[in-house]
Amino acid sequence: MKLTKLSGNYLKSSIAALAMAAFCVPAVNAQTITSNQTGTHNGFYYSFWKDSGDATFGLREDGRYTSQWSNSTNNWVGGKGWNPGGPKVVSYSGSYNVDNSQNSYLALYGWTKSPLIEYYVIESYGSYNPASCSGGTDYGSFQSDGATYNVRRCQRVNQPSIDGTQTFYQYFSVRTPKKGFGSISGTITVANHFNFWASKGLNLGNHDYMVLATEGYQSSGSSDITVWEGNSGGGSSSSSSSSSSSSSSSSSSGGNTGGGVTVRARGTDGSEHINLRIGGNVVANWTLTTSAQNYTYTGSASGDIEVQFDNDSSGRDVILDYITVNGETRQAEDMEYNTSTYDGSCGGGSYSQNMHCNGVIGFGSTSDCFSGNCSGGGSSSSSSSSSSSSSSSSSSSSSSSSSSSSSGGGSACQCNWYGSLYPSCQNQSSGWGWENSASCIGDDTCADQWGNGGVVCN
C-alpha cells in the first residue's frame, strides 16, 4: 500500500425532483468516494484507501473506475477487481494519465493472509521503479503476456495493512517494457506470477482481495480504467489471414501502417510460417519467401504484439528484421522478450532477429510509443517520449556501446537510472528521449530520481 519513496418554488420543486430521482436510481449508478472504503459495485469488489489529501475515486459501470489526485495527497491506492483474488486472467483498458516525473503505479494489486503478503504486478509506473526498493531481494525474471517481469521482494516494517499495523513482505513483478502513459490496455495471466513466485519460495497465503489498481505517492494524476476477467477481445480479426504483401524487399522502411502492423521478414528455406498475434489472438498469418518482404495487417486489433514462428524443422529459420506500428519501427534485435532464439537451448536468447525455434518475439503493445514520435491509428495516448523509457530496446544492456558508438560524438556521460545505465540525452535536458537508436535520459530528470542514481561521466 506504499510506494517506497436557483430560488423560490423552482428551487423547491427541483430539490424534490432530484430526491425522487435519487430514490429511483438503481444501485449500479456512479458514485464518487473521497474517504477510505471497500465494498462491491456492479458485480466487482472495490477498495479505496488514502492517508491524507484530496484523492477521489469514482465507481462507474461494470468494472470501470476513475481516479484523480494531486500533490496534497501523500499516498493513496484504489481499484476494482475481486474478493477473493486468485489465479485469474485479468484484462484492462482505459487511460493512465501521469508522466515520468510522477511517483505512481498502475498494477494488479492484492493481499493474502497467513502469511500476510501484499503483492503487485506492475504494468506501468512513473518516477519510481519498485524493482529497486531499498533492502529488497531480487529473484530473477520470467516472461509472460508479451513481456519480461523482474521479481523483487521487499519488507514493510510496522506499516498499514489489511490487518492493521504489521510487518509483512511485498512481492513485486515489474513489467519490462512498462506500458506507456495515456491510452493503455493489457492482459495479465496471474497464475504465471503466482507460480514463478512459488518456484522461488515466495509463497502466498489465503487470498483476500485483488484489484487492478492505480496508486500515487506525493504526485498528481488521473486514471480511467475498466477491468474484466478473461482475455482481451483483441479487436477485429477480419480477413487477416491474407496472403503476403507484395511490398518490394528493397524498401527499408515499413512506413505508417495507418493503424495496422507491418512485419518485415524472410525465411531461410521459403516455407517458414509466422503468425501475427495481438492481444493474445492470431490476427494474421503468412508463409515467408527467402526474400525479405513486408507483410501487412490492416485491422484494428489492440494489445501486446508478438510475431510467432510455428513450423520449425530442419533447415527452417526466420529472419525477422522489424515491425512498424504507429508510424515507428521496432527492431527485433532491440526486443528482450524472445522465446524463439537458440542459445544453447530454445528460448535461451534475447535481442536477436533470428528465430531458430518455434516461439515468439514480443514487440510491446499497440499503445506504446518507444520513439516518442508516433503517428497513425495505433496509440491515442499522449505518452510521447515517456513510454520510450519502457522500451524493450537493449539500451540498458548495451549502454556502454551506445555511449561510445554515438555518431554525433557528444558526451561520455550516462545516467544511472535505479541501477541501470542509459545514455544521457544530448538534445534535451529533461525527460526521456530517443537518440542514436536507443532510449536516453535528460540530465535534469536523471538527477531528480530517488535513491543513489544520477549522472555518471567518464
Image (cartoon, rainbow, N blue to C red):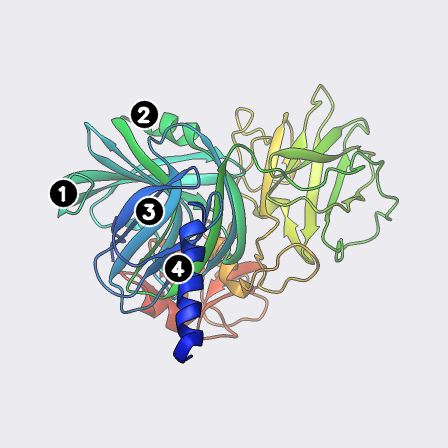
Task: Choose mark 4 or mark 2, whichever is in front.
Answer: 4
What separation in Å lies between label 3 and label 1 (alpha carbons)? 25 Å
Q: Amino acid at mark 2?
A: Ala
* Residue bearing mark 4: 19
What separation in Å lies between label 3 and label 2 (alpha carbons)? 18 Å
- Sequence-wise, which precedes: disc 1 or disc 4? 4
Q: Are marks 2 and 1 in contact (CB under 8 Å)?
A: no
- Sequence-wise, which precedes: disc 3 or disc 2? 3
Report the side of 65 relative to 278 (left or right).
left
Q: Amino acid at mark 4?
A: Ala
* Residue bearing mark 3: 131
User: Tag 4, which secondary structure?
Assistant: helix
Q: Say whether residue 407 is visible.
A: yes
Residue 126's spot in the image, x, y percent? 39, 59
What separation in Å lies between label 4 and label 3 (alpha carbons)? 50 Å
Task: Choose mark 2 or mark 1, whichever is in front.
Answer: 1
* Residue bearing mark 1: 164
What separation in Å lies between label 4 and label 2 (alpha carbons)? 53 Å
Q: Residue at x 39, y 46 (%)?
A: 107
Query: Residue pushed farthest bottom?
Result: 7
Q: Which mark is residue 198?
A: 2
Q: Nearer the viewer, residue 376 or 295?
A: 376
Task: Choose mark 4 or mark 3, whichever is in front.
Answer: 4
Q: Is residue 286 above or below residue 336?
A: above
Q: Nearer the viewer, residue 267 or 216?
A: 216
Q: Residues within 10 Å of mark 3 (few under 14, many from 20)?
A: many
Q: Is residue 302 above or below residue 89?
A: below
Task: Choose mark 1 or mark 4, whichever is in front.
Answer: 4
